[in-house]
Image (cartoon, rainbow, N blue to C red):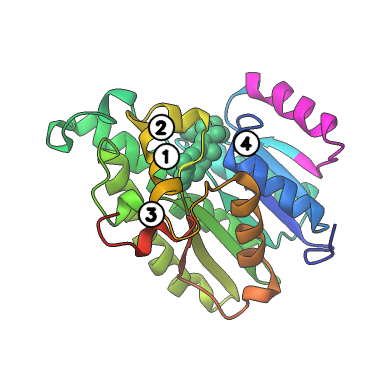
Amino acid sequence: MNTILQDKTIVVMGVANNRSIAWGIAKSLHNAGANLILTYRQERSKQKLEKLLAKNEIKPKMVVACDVEDDDSIKQAFQEIGEQVGTIHGLVHSVAFANTDELQGEYAATSRDGYLTAQNISAYSLVAVTHEARKLMTEGGGIVTQTYLGSERVVPNYNVMGVAKAALEASVRYLAEDVGKDGVRVNAVSAGPIRTLSAKGVSGFNEKMSVIEEKAPLRRQVDHDQVGDATLFLLSDLARGVTGEVLHVDSGFHIMAGS
Ligand code: NAD
């Protein structure tokens, strides 16, 4: 336990289960004294999320529905948060989606619908939630999203999601400029491969994990706690001079030629 985020209220989007990266982040933030607000997409996920929180003895300030495909849902979620909690100091965006049939084979075969779905849920959603969240960040704060190396390099099968992550990272920079004048920072963590529900959808995912152990400078896998702690750093005052940045938490894999 530490007190880095004592008295700070942070919204965490994207906990689907205990394997979600957002869950690793929620635990790091909780251990740093933050008050948590969690969002879920579908009503049936709510109970699961509440059980997970109770099992880990985490009492959130709120658990609220938010489907990032739906502008009204986003507006309503942040309105409810504003009414019940008031000021927030941070937002974690750990949300992405692409159809599994677009995460295999050639990128050149991507359908228009598949392209737009990936962009909509995985990249535009950061813009939409930043727009609403900043209204509640009256004391400044941090926004952190989750990206992946497939935005910078061609990672086999990552395809449409790599292009969506490139848009997401560009959005981090443009948003950082817009909200910087309000004392709000926007950054991304680029994590190495971690076994989650979403990761299962990417064809050949196991090979992506094993190559980290073989070739990354640290020669070991990345886990949820490492991503959680890096996200905690970016949300905290320790990173008060950092915005528009993509921080790689990948055992150093991205620096290697031929990686
Ligand atoms: P996950 O499946 O646990 O999380 C994805 C989350 O997105 C889920 O909670 C899901 O409910 C949510 N989501 C999807 N559509 C939504 C919608 N319309 N509205 C609201 N929420 C929606 O998988 P994860 O791997 O923890 O993914 C979290 C983030 O981390 C994603 O952005 C992913 O691209 C990124 N990431 C993952 C890895 C990895 O190897 N797992 C590596 C780098 C980055």
Q: Say which element carries label 4.
A: loop
The span from disc 2 to disc 4 (Cα, nearest Å) is 22 Å
Cβ–Cβ under 8 Å for marks 4 and 3: no
Question: Residue 89, position in %: x, y?
Answer: 70, 63
| Extreme-left residue of the structure | 108
Question: Residue 76, position in %: x, y?
Answer: 61, 41
At x 79%, y 34%, the residue is 53
Amino acid identity at mark 4: Val
As drawn, is 258 to the left or to the right of 11? left
As drawn, is 141 to the left or to the right of 190? right
Classify residue 24 by image quadrant. Answer: top right
The span from disc 1 to disc 4 (Cα, nearest Å) is 25 Å
Q: Is residue 58 magenta?
A: yes
Q: Mark 3 points at which residue?
A: 168
At x 29%, y 57%, the residue is 152
Say few, some or many: other residues with alpha carbon within 10 Å of mark 4 (under 14 / 14 to 19 / 20 or more): many
As drawn, the label of residue 15 is 4
Amino acid identity at mark 1: Ser
Q: Mark 2 points at which residue?
A: 206
| Magenta stretch: dominant secondary structure | helix
Residue 124 can be seen in this image: no
Mark 4 C-beta to ligand 1 under 8 Å: yes
Cβ–Cβ under 8 Å for marks 1 and 2: yes
Amino acid identity at mark 2: Asn
In primary-sequence order, the first of circles 1 and 3 is 3
Range covered by the magenta-colored residues: 44-62
Q: Mark 1 points at which residue?
A: 210
